[in-house]
Amino acid sequence: MTQVIETVDVDVPVSVAYNQWTQFETFPKFLSFVESITQIDDTHTHWKVKIAGVEREFDATITEQHADERVAWNSTGGDENHAGVVTFHKLSDTTSRVTVQLDWSAEGFLEKVGAVFGVDDAIIKGDLKNFKKFIEAQPAPTGAWRGDVEN
């Protein structure tokens, strides 16, 4: 099992960072490996990703979600086997920390080599920097879902 934990501080209130993160269909604007995400309902999404030049599709289920605190999920179909959680931490009224933890089974030679050499960490770190640029450039989040999903 491969695990990546990366953090970025963003110059927006925690509610703004959280609200934007709940807008899964905007992920291709800042996550380099995401081609598209379709929100099926409050807790189900369908992902199309491209990892190491290989296109994959899978479904994911939100397993826990609490406004301004966390969003956790598991993949539920397709070729991907992973789980993750994003947590949101208030640093001040105008600054927040976003932490992403991803756990997955590396598939294929390129993914296994990438995991060994820390390529996954670098990609996630870069994508969190992309999120920072994206959210700090927005006058407001593109939407919000503030519902609660109990674990």
Image (spheres, grey):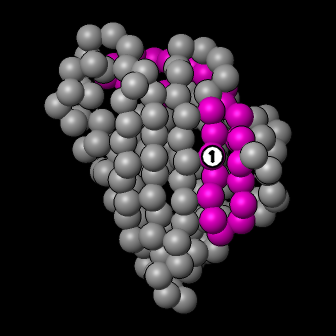
Q: Position of residue 144 (x, y in %)?
A: 72, 63
Q: Is residue 111 visible?
A: yes
Q: Is residue 67 above or below residue 73?
A: below
Q: Is residue 108 above or below residue 127?
A: above
Q: Main secondary structure of the magenta part?
A: strand
Dividing the image into 4 quarters, which one contains the N terminus?
top left
Residue at screen point 36% across, 53% down: 6
**SS state under label 1:** strand
> Is residue 46 covered in magenta?
no
Say few, some or many: other residues with alpha carbon within 10 Å of mark 1 (under 14 / 14 to 19 / 20 or more).
many
Residue 41 left/right relative to 109: right
Residue 115 lies in quadrant: top left
Label 1 belongs to which residue?
Answer: 72
Q: In this picture, which residue range is highlighted in magenta?
A: 49-74
Residue at screen point 53% across, 41% down: 84
Q: Is residue 12 visible?
A: no
Q: Nearer the viewer, residue 92 or 144?
A: 92
Q: Nearer the viewer, residue 85 or 127?
A: 85
Residue type indicated by callout 1: Ala
